[in-house]
Image (cartoon, helix red, strand yellow):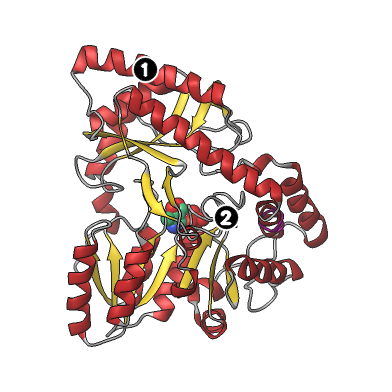
């Protein structure tokens, strides 16, 4: 019998492995650095203090005493883990309370809590879609949405990021596919930090009889009067069929949820493999998420949401003034019919080539500022960026210090390598 090829053979000499090793050898690897302190505005990383501009802890609630108490109380009451599925021995009163309060917050009939946000997306799309259906995604959608779509075996059709003419032509093609159609978009896009034009998307879905799911991972606890996300901000909550959120950002924990009609949520609870065939979220994670949700829904929550958006504006406008290529504020008409211009807590700095992003990251790191680097395939080829993000707990002085570091790094980088991309407007 012939020996089959070794499945491990493909990892040897893999282009990505070689690239990571080369970057590490030159001290340019922006990944896997150790965080040695709580997720505060300034953290200890690899033995030195760094201003944290790479966290999704948007409201800064991971260190909030009320949220930590929520985690501690849950731990004391139910132990470290539930060692089983929600279906069997993994549902505590806390899980049910959290699902009830999430549905109330979102204004939907019901909600389901998954152990991670990734599983919420994979478990929802792979269960509700099937071969014969068509799923229409924005090219900037999060990887977990694509994974769920692929697992479902529905026909996958992508349209160019936030281009409504392309969504329309894709829906024309989807209609001809002959099955059910679902459109799936991020509310705030995780790399670009921009907002999906949900009013236009809702109108197109209604015209073509398509269902709509919005991933509000970065928008819950951030946008809208109640912090219920992009759909709330834009006044289309009732027209969005499914709204997904995660606990790993504003909700200061780990886990995810989907909110929508009761019969759809019930179906997911008995049919979604990513819900059934995994252990239930640990008590401390659920207790923290519930406590964070209660803070967000209180007056304190409104103040934190206002602060994180103010901080985002300060960072965005500061980087723009320094000549960096950052996103422009998004003009929106809010649910009350008033014009508003929004800068989300994600402030990407577009730099173009991967090597430039790695070198800038390193220079900022040396200057005491931590940023995230996004290179292909997280972004399109040639679209590398430094993804910066702010928290409500940053203050103006810290953001000014980070801007000073950006100014120095830019001057030195351009003296050696030529100009970086400037503002597009
Ligand atoms: C837009 C979006 N959706 C889903 C997820 C997955 O959520 P989690 O990390 O909580 O599993 C993320 C997290 O990175 C995200 O950015």
Q: Which mark is residue 386?
A: none
Q: Position of residue 373 (x, y in %)?
A: 36, 36
- Numbered disc 1: secondary structure: helix
Instruction: Examine the rendered structure and indicate whether residue 267 appears above or below residue 409.
Output: below
Q: Which mark is residue 407?
A: 1
Q: Which residues are magenta?
A: 287-291
Seen from the viewer's position, the closer of residues 266 and 355 is 266
**In the displayed structure, does residue 304 sit left or right of residue 342?**
right
Instruction: Examine the rendered structure and indicate whether residue 158 appears above or below residue 45.
Output: below
* Image quarter (top left, top right, bottom left or bottom right) of the C terminus: top left
Q: Main secondary structure of the magenta part?
A: helix
Discs 2, 1 touching: Cβ within 8 Å: no
Answer few, some or many: residues within 10 Å of disc 2's Cα (few below 14, many 20 plus, some between 14 and 19).
Answer: some
Q: Is residue 249 visible?
A: yes
- Numbered disc 2: secondary structure: loop
Q: Is residue 189 visible?
A: no
Instruction: Examine the rendered structure and indicate whether residue 133 appears above or below residue 355.
Output: below
Mark 2 vs mark 1, foreground winner is 2
> Mark 2 or mark 1, which has the lower sequence index?
2
* Whether the residue under disc 1 has CB within 8 Å of ligand 1: no
**In the displayed structure, does residue 341 sit left or right of residue 259?**
left
Residue 387, magenta (yes or no): no
Residue 290, magenta (yes or no): yes
Q: Position of residue 154 (x, y in %)?
A: 29, 78
Seen from the viewer's position, the closer of residues 144 and 204 is 204
Reading the image, the residue beneath label 2 is 225
Task: Find residue 381 and report its image quarter.
Answer: top left
Instruction: Examine the rendered structure and indicate whether residue 110 appears above or below residue 95.
Output: below
Tally of numbered discs: 2
The residue positioned 22% from the left and 58% from the top of the image is 160
Seen from the viewer's position, the closer of residues 311 and 357 is 311
């Amino acid at each position: 019998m012939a020996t089959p090829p070794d499945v491990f053979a493909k990892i040897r000499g893999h282009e990505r492995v070689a690239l990571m090793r080369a970057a590490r050898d030159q001290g340019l690897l922006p990944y896997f650095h150790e965080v040695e302190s709580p997720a505060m505005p300034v953290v200890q990383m690899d033995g030195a203090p760094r201003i944290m501009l790479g966290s999704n802890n948007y409201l800064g609630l991971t260190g909030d005493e009320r949220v930590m108490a929520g985690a501690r109380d849950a731990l004391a009451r139910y132990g470290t883990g539930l060692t089983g599925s929600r279906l069997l021995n993994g549902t505590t009163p806390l899980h049910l309370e959290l699902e009830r309060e999430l549905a109330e917050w979102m204004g939907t009939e019901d909600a389901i809590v998954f152990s991670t946000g990734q599983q919420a997306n994979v478990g929802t799309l792979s269960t509700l879609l099937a071969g014969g259906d068509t799923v229409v995604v924005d090219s900037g959608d999060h990887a977990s949405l694509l994974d769920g779509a692929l697992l479902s075996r529905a026909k996958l059709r992508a349209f160019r990021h936030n281009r409504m003419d392309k969504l329309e032509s894709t829906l024309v093609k989807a209609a001809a596919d002959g099955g059910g159609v679902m459109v799936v978009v991020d509310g705030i896009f995780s790399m670009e930090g921009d907002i999906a034009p949900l009013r236009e998307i809702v109108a197109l879905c209604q015209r073509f009889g398509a269902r709509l799911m919005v991933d509000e991972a970065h928008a819950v606890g951030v946008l809208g009067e109640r912090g219920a996300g992009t759909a709330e901000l834009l006044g289309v909550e009732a027209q969005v069929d499914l709204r997904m959120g995660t606990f790993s950002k504003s909700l200061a924990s780990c886990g995810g949820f989907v909110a929508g009609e009761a019969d759809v949520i019930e179906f997911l609870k008995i049919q979604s493999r990513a819900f059934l065939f995994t252990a239930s979220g640990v008590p401390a994670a659920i207790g923290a998420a519930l406590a964070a949700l209660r803070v967000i829904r209180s007056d304190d929550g409104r103040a934190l949401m206002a602060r994180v958006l103010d901080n985002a504006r300060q960072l965005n406008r500061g980087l723009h003034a320094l000549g960096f290529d950052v996103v422009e504020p998004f003009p929106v008409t809010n649910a009350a019919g008033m014009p508003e211009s929004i800068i989300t807590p994600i402030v990407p700095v577009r730099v173009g080539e991967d090597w430039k992003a790695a070198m800038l990251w390193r220079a900022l790191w040396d200057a005491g500022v931590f940023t995230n680097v996004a290179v292909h395939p997280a972004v399109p080829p040639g679209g590398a960026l430094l993804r910066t993000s702010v928290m409500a707990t940053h203050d103006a002085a810290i953001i000014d210090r980070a801007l000073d570091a950006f100014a120095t790094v830019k001057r030195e980088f351009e003296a050696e390598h030529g100009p970086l991309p400037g503002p597009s407007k």
